[in-house]
């Protein structure tokens, strides 16, 4: 799986959009971009994933650049409960191998401030 | 649907002892992965089990082992505990299919080795 690079930390004002960048310049064509977050001392929580099209769900939006070398996770209206470590992961999901092996980097610590 | 459960939630052991941790995946999920999280190394993949077979293994010594039962429940064992094994051990389950699948994490077992 490709290596990803994220800023160590970011701040965001409550109610504003939080934009978390991720660089994955060596991503291969069959690797998806996944985002997970981990609130202090809890298990990581899946947020969203995408291959090349932008994706949106009830939690967030994922914008992937056309060359797929970077992406941005957008939390449209951040709340204090969104304070967490956010992980961007490039991963190839297949039935025969690597399905369950996620490589976590250091992630971005997002601090949402009132 | 019940989430991933891990038992026990907290555990204190002494050096040289062994420990067994248990994970019950979400009903219908056949893949179970284990991760170790420490402040220094972050989240690291230990191993993955699918249909009672280990199909992925991280870079950990042989003291770390696991197994999966026919009902998909999984256990991991650490023998001859060392101080450095103190960590949060996380289990994740996923539904294996032809497309990308998210992993659902349990709350973790906090192991302290004295």
Image (cartoon, rainbow, N blue to C red):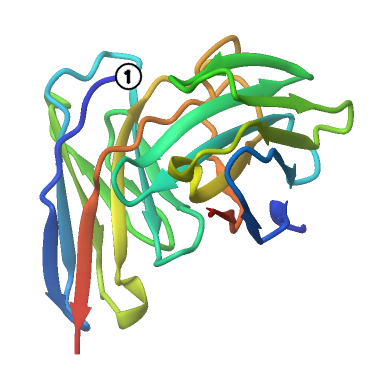
Q: Secondary structure at mark 1?
A: loop
Say left or right for B59 vs A84.
right
Q: Quadrant of the N terminus of chain A?
A: top left
The one of A31 and B4 positioned closer to us in this rendering: B4
Q: Which residue is mark 1?
A: A1
- In this rendered view, identify the residue nearer to me: A62 or B8: B8
Quarter containing the C terminus of chain A: bottom left
Q: Quadrant of residue B53?
A: top right
Position of residue A18 measured from the top left corner of the image (x, y, whole percent): 18, 66
Residue found at x 20% / y 32%: A4
Q: Which residue is drawn at the image coordinates 74% and 36% (left, top)?
A: B75
**Residue extending farthest top:** A96
Q: Position of residue B45 (x, y in %)?
A: 46, 30
x 69%, y 51%: residue: B4
Q: How many marks?
A: 1
- The quarter holding residue A55 reads top left
* Residue B77, placed above or below residue A110: above
- Which residue extends farthest bottom? A114
* Residue A111, percent from left and from top: 20, 72
| Residue at x-position 12% and y-position 64% | A10
Q: Residues within 10 Å of mark 1 (few under 14, many from 20)?
A: some
Task: Provide the chain ID for the residue under circle 1.
Answer: A
Viewer-nearest residue: B86 or A73: B86
């Amino acid at each position: 799986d490709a290596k990803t690079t994220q800023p160590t930390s970011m701040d965001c004002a409550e109610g504003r959009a939080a934009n978390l960048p991720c660089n994955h310049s060596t991503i291969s064509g069959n690797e998806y971009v996944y985002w997970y977050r981990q609130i202090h001392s809890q298990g990581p929580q899946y947020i969203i994933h995408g291959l090349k099209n932008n994706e949106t769900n009830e939690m967030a939006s994922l914008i992937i650049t056309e060359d797929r070398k970077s992406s941005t996770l957008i939390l449209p209206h951040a709340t204090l409960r969104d304070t967490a470590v956010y992980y961007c992961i490039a991963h190839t999901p297949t039935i025969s191998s690597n399905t369950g092996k996620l490589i976590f980097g250091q992630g971005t610590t997002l601090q949402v401030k009132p | 649907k019940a989430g991933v459960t891990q038992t026990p939630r907290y555990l204190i052991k002494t050096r040289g002892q062994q420990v067994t941790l248990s994970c019950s995946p979400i009903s219908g999920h056949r893949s179970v992965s284990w991760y170790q999280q420490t402040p220094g190394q972050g989240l690291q993949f230990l191993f993955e089990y699918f249909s009672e077979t280990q199909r992925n293994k991280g870079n950990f010594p042989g003291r770390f082992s696991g197994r999966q039962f026919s009902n998909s429940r999984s256990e991991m064992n650490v023998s001859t505990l060392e101080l450095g094994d103190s960590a949060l051990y996380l289990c994740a389950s996923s539904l294996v299919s032809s497309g990308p699948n998210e992993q659902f994490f349990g709350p973790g077992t906090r192991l302290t080795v004295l």
